Amino acid sequence: MASWSVFAAEAPELAARVRAAFDANKHKTLATLRRGGAPRISGTETIFAGDDVWLGSMLHARKAQDLLRDPRYALHSATIDPGSDPAGWPGEAKVSGRVEAVTDPDRFRSVVGPDGDPTGMHLFRCDLAEVVHTGLNDQADKMIILFWRPGEAVRLFER
């Protein structure tokens, strides 16, 4: 697993594409695992702060309970239709790995701000096991998939 900063140092061009895809819209899609192992999809927001990517959640929300029980997650940027301007499309990004629940008040406030209250919401730091960016080539006639895992070179797939 790796932090966002480790990923960005190992694959800076891919990190820029992934960040642009995540920053294109406020809302993302989070996949967690229910108690019985079935997937759960939830809307969420992300925070890029310090060396990491962070997820917040309302206190006792189902997605938070899932993550507290099983820290595995997958996070997908908002889906945007390239429409008539594929050159301006930021693509789509996916990251997956495990989260760490943050309850230390000082660490919590360093991410959410001085008024942050760890007793009023959940905060999770995301470790990255995989990062994927899906986009189009310059001619917009083929899909380009960039794939990274910690300690490995970025792999490119064209379809």
Image (cartoon, rainbow, N blue to C red):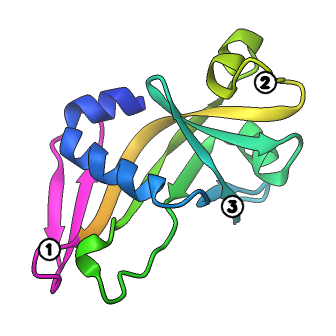
Q: Earlier in the sequence, mark 3 or mark 1?
A: 3
Q: Residue furthest left?
A: 139
Quarter-wise, where is residue 126 in the image?
Answer: top right
The image shows residue 63 at horizontal and vertical percentages of 76, 51
The image shows residue 9 at horizontal and vertical percentages of 24, 29
Using residue 13 as the reference point, say whether residue 107 is left or right of it: right
Q: Are marks 2 and 1 in contact (CB under 8 Å)?
A: no
The image shows residue 107 at horizontal and vertical percentages of 66, 14
**In the image shown, does 133 or 39 lie closer to the viewer?**
133
Give the residue at x 74% y 13%: 104
Mark 2 Cα within 10 Å, few/some/many (few <14, many 20+)? some
In the picture, the quarter occupied by the C terminus is bottom left
Mark 3 Cα within 10 Å, few/some/many (few <14, many 20+)? some
Label 1: which residue?
A: 137
Magenta stretch: includes residue 152 = yes
Look at the numbered disc 1 and give the secondary structure of its residue: loop
Q: Amino acid at mark 1?
A: Asn
Considering only vertical position in the picture, is 132 above or below 117?
Answer: below
Q: Amino acid at mark 2?
A: Gly
Q: For the magenta stretch, what is the residue range?
A: 136-159
Residue 1 appearing in the image: no
Q: Which circle marks residue 116 in the picture? A: 2
Label 3: which residue?
A: 43
Q: Nearer the viewer, mark 2 or mark 1?
A: 2
Give the residue at x 62% y 57%: 30
